[in-house]
Image (cartoon, grey):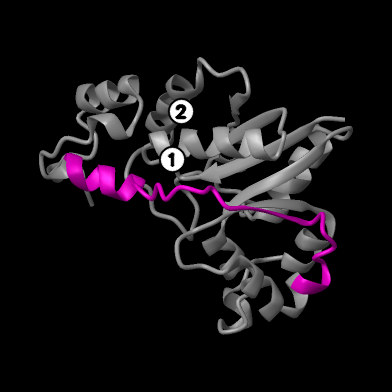
Amino acid sequence: MGKIGIYGSSFDPVTNVHLWTASTIAHRAKLDKVIFLPCANGRIDKKMKTSNEHRWEMLVMAIEDNPLFEVSDYEINERAGTGKQYTWYTMEYFKTRYPSDEVYFIMGADLLDDMDNQDQPVHLRWKFREKLIANHKFIVMARDGIDMLKIISKSPLLRNYDDGNTFHLIDKGLSMEISSTYIRDEFSVGGEPRYLLPDRCYQYILDKKLYQKDTMP
């Protein structure tokens, strides 16, 4: 039985922090594979700055030299515009695809907080969250200022499924919070974020003139 992590994000663009995070998690959680899952432009909860095609190309370039990493088009192609881009459907798909393996959803502590936040109206919490938590496993990355254990203890749903296996909490041990937003902002004002993302992705952005001020929404 193998261990597989599903790493979903907009990757707009993919950064060196994304890659470092995936590598750190693979090492700490003893994963056999990390699957990068770029979300589709059609999602109602996210607004992308570039096309699916550009984000896909940059991801492929970014991970090509690491045999532990793969990229999946499940959301941007198979589920684009279907209304089934909730994490429940994603995890069911990968669980079916890898029936003999343990499949984990990789997320930050901020998403753990969103999953069943008792301060949020019920309709703003994650869709199908109860069966998602009951049937799947999660690797949760620390975020500065977020107490992961406190989040779990505050939610009746999270704490009642916290059997020691459902949530694998990882303190990365080093604060690296440079975001895709920061990189996009730097490109838009003529900044120099060269060493914050893979060289080939940096050059791709320059060649395609992505994230320029006149192309930003």
Q: Look at label 1 and name its amino acid.
A: Phe
Q: Secondary structure at mark 1?
A: loop
Horizontal side of residue 177 vs 7, given as left or right: left
Badge 1 crowding class, 10 Å Cα cut-off, few under 14, some 14 to 19, many 20 or more, is many
Task: Say whether residue 170 is magenta.
Answer: yes
- Residue range highlighted in magenta: 159-187
Coordinates of residue 21 in the picture (x, y in percent): 51, 40
Q: Look at label 2 and name its amino acid.
A: Leu
Residue 116 shows in this picture: no
Q: Quarter of the image containing the N terminus?
A: top right
Q: Which residue is mark 1?
A: 11
What residue occupies the far front of the structure in this picture? 173
Residue contact at pointers 1 and 2, CB within 8 angstroms: yes
Q: Nearer the viewer, residue 106 or 31?
A: 31
Residue 99 got which mark?
none
Q: Nearer the viewer, residue 192 or 215?
A: 192
Q: Which residue is mark 2?
A: 59
